[in-house]
Amino acid sequence: MRKLFGTDGIRGEANIYPMTSEIALAFGKAISVIFRNQGKQKILIGKDTRLSGYMIENALVSGICSMGGDAYLVGPLPTPGIAFLTGSMRVDAGVVISASHNPFQDNGIKVFSSKGYKLPDAKEEEIERLIFENNFDNNIPENSAIGRAQRIDDALGRYVVFLQTTFPKDLDLKGLKIVLDCANGATYKVAPEVFYELGAEIITIGTNPNGVNINDGCGSTNTRKLRSKVIEEEADLGIAFDGDGDRCIMVDENGEELDGDYIIAGTAEYFKRINELSNNGVVLTPMSNLGIELFLKRQNIDVVKSGIGDRYVVEEMLKGNYNVGGEPSGHIIYRNFNTTGDGILTALQFIRVMLKDGKKASDFKKLFFKFPQVLKNVPVKDKIPLQNIKGLKEKTEEFENILGNRGRIFIRYSGTEKKLRIMLEGEYDKQINNMADELVEIVERHFNS
C-alpha cells in the first residue's frame, strides 16, 4: 500500500501531513537522488497560485540542492506547461506544486520524467521508500557540489509559442468572441495571451489570483459565472480551466456546458475524417458517458478503457499507440502535441474543429444522446475495502441487474480525497437518483454505526 501517492501525486491540506515542509524537503532529496545522472541533475519546478506554494517550493528547492541537484524555477505555470518544458529544456525531471481543482487550502506535488510523462507506480514507490527511510547520508555531495537554484524568466513565453504552434497556420480566431475563466489559477496569464495573439476578442474572469481564491466559485468545476457571462456578452464560446490548467470545460453560445465527452467526441470524429486518428481508437475511462461510447462505435472508432486518472489514460494510449484520450472532467490528452492533459491546447483543438467544419459550439451537443448520470461523493473516515461495507455489494448487483446493458454503476474511492464516489448511469433520471440515494445510505450507515 502506497502511503503518500494517490492517483495524481501527493495531495492533502497544506501544512498538515503529508503536505508539510518536512515531507517536501525529503521529497526534494529523494527525486534529486533518483534522477541523478552522469552530470549534475536538473529539476524544473512550477506551481499554481496557492498561498502555500511558496512554502512547498522553498522546501523542495532546499532538498534538491542539498543532494547536488540544480533547481530551475518557473513560478505559476500550468501543469502541461511544466510537462512541455521538462522535455524541451532536456532537464531530468519536472515537478508541479498544485492540487489541481481542489480548494486553496489543499496542495500537492506531482512529477514528470525527462520525457514529460507522469511517473509510473514503481518510480513513485521508490520515492516513497527514500522519503520514509530518510537516510540520505550516502548521497550527500561535496560542499563544492551543492546545487543552485535559478529562475527561468522566459518560461511563460516559451509555452505560449508552443501552444500557438499546435493551432493550424491557415486559421485564426478573428471574429470570435471568447470568455475565458482561468479559475484564478495557473492559466491566468498564459490563456489570455494565447487567445488574444491568435486574434480573438476575449473577456476574462478568474484572472486575479490572491493566493486563496483559486477555484473559488469559478473554473471548470463551477461554470455558473462563465455561463452567465457568455450570455451577457453574447459570446461565441466560453472556456473554463481548472486551477492547474490541465482541464478544460467548454460553454456554448447558449450558455450550455460541454464536458470532456463532447469535446473528445467532436475532435476524435474530425481526426478520423482527416486521417489524424492514430490506430483508429480513443481511450476513455469508466467515468465517460455511455452515450459517447455508442457514438464512437457508430463512427467505427474503437473504444479502449483505462483506469481512472489521466496518467492511466496516457499509459493505455502509449501501449496501443492512440493519440486521443481523456475523461469527462475535461482532462484530455492529444498525444500528437503534448504528453499530458492540456486545457488550453484542448480548447484550441475544439475551436479548430468548429472553424474547419463551420460549426457553432452548440452543434457538439447534437453528436450523441447523453445518458442521465448521477455522481455522489460520500465523505469517509477510512478507505476500507468496498466488500467490507455491509450490504453494498448485494445492493449494487441488484441495481445492475435492473439497469442491464442500458446503464451501469461505478463505485470507487477518490484518489485525492477521503471520499467514496458513487456513479450511476441509466435512461431515467428518477430511477438512477433513487438508486444512488440507497447506495449512499448504505455507506453512511456503515461509517456512522
Image: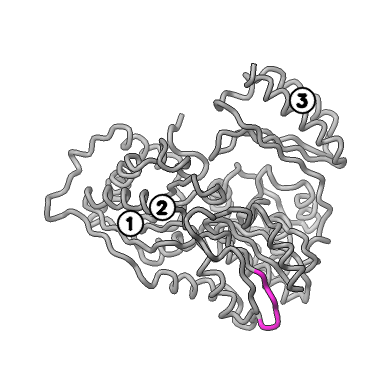
- Seen at 23% across and 55% down, the residue is 38
Tell me residue 89's x, y (percent).
Answer: 36, 66
* Marks 3,2: beta carbons within 8 A: no
Mark closest to the chain's N terminus, 1 or 3: 1
Query: Residue sitting at 26 percent across and 58 percent down?
Result: 70
The residue indicated by pointer 1 is 43
Q: Which mark is residue 53?
A: 2
Labels 1 and 2: the sequence-earlier one: 1
Q: Nearer the viewer, residue 125 or 231?
A: 231
Counting residues from the start of the chain, the first of labels 3 and 2 encountered is 2
Q: Is residue 303 above or below residue 4?
A: below
* Residue range corresponding to the magenta coloring: 174-179
- Work out whether 110 lies above or below 386: below
User: Callout 3 environment at 10 Å: few (<14), some (14 to 19), or many (20+)?
Assistant: few
Total label count? 3
How far across and down, in percent of the image, does residue 233 sit? Answer: 73, 73
Q: From what the image shows, is residue 24 above or below residue 193?
A: above
Hey, what amino acid is under mark 2? Gly
Disc number at residue 167? Answer: none
Residue 28 left/right relative to 11: left
User: Which residue: 55% across, 66% down?
Assistant: 207
Looking at the image, which residue is at 66% across and 65% down? 239
Question: Which kind of residue does numbered mark 1 sit on?
Answer: Ile
Marks 1, 3: nearer the viewer: 1
